[in-house]
Image: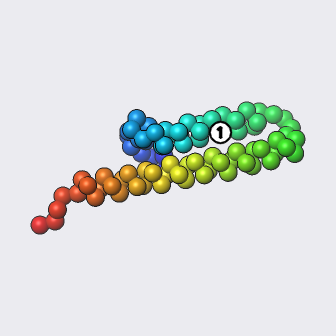
Amino acid sequence: MLKNRPALVGQLLKTDEHFRQLYEEHRALDHQLKELDKRLYLTTEQQLEVTKLKKLKLKNKDRMEEILVQHERTYVVEGASPSP
């Protein structure tokens, strides 16, 4: 989860343009969903939009998680000390 690794997320936001783009898009999608959630009634089109936004948001979260895991694996492999 992204919230469990705030230091790594912060580092990637500064150093990884792709991660930063995904993160910003994820936040924008979240904002759009919150705006739609404020409505008392959603049209059929709006309901479809909510479904689409949720799928995109989840897709971005999954991509960010993959980048985090890849970064952690690289860091552990590069930062690991050799066994005696």
Residue 59 sits above or below residue 9 on the image: below
Residue 24 sits above or below residue 68 on the image: above
Q: Label 1, on which residue?
A: 29
Give the quadrant of the C terminus.
Answer: bottom left
Residue toward you, 37 or 20: 20
What crowding class fits label 1: few (fewer than 14 Cα within 10 Å), some (14-19), or many (20 or more)? many
| Residue 64, position as x, y percentages in the image | 50, 48
Give the residue drawn at x 44%, y 37%. Answer: 13
Give the residue drawn at x 86%, y 38%. Answer: 41
| Amino acid beneath label 1 | Leu
Q: Please state if 82 lies on the left or on the right of 56 as rendered.
A: left
Q: Please state if 27 lies on the left or on the right of 10 as rendered.
A: right
Give the structural element (helix, strand or loop) at label 1: helix
Give the residue drawn at x 60%, y 52%. Answer: 59
What is the residue that sits farthest to the left in this orientation?
Answer: 84
| Residue 65, position as x, y percentages in the image | 49, 52
Please count the marks in the image. 1
| Residue 28, position as x, y percentages in the image | 63, 35
| Residue 76, position as x, y percentages in the image | 29, 56
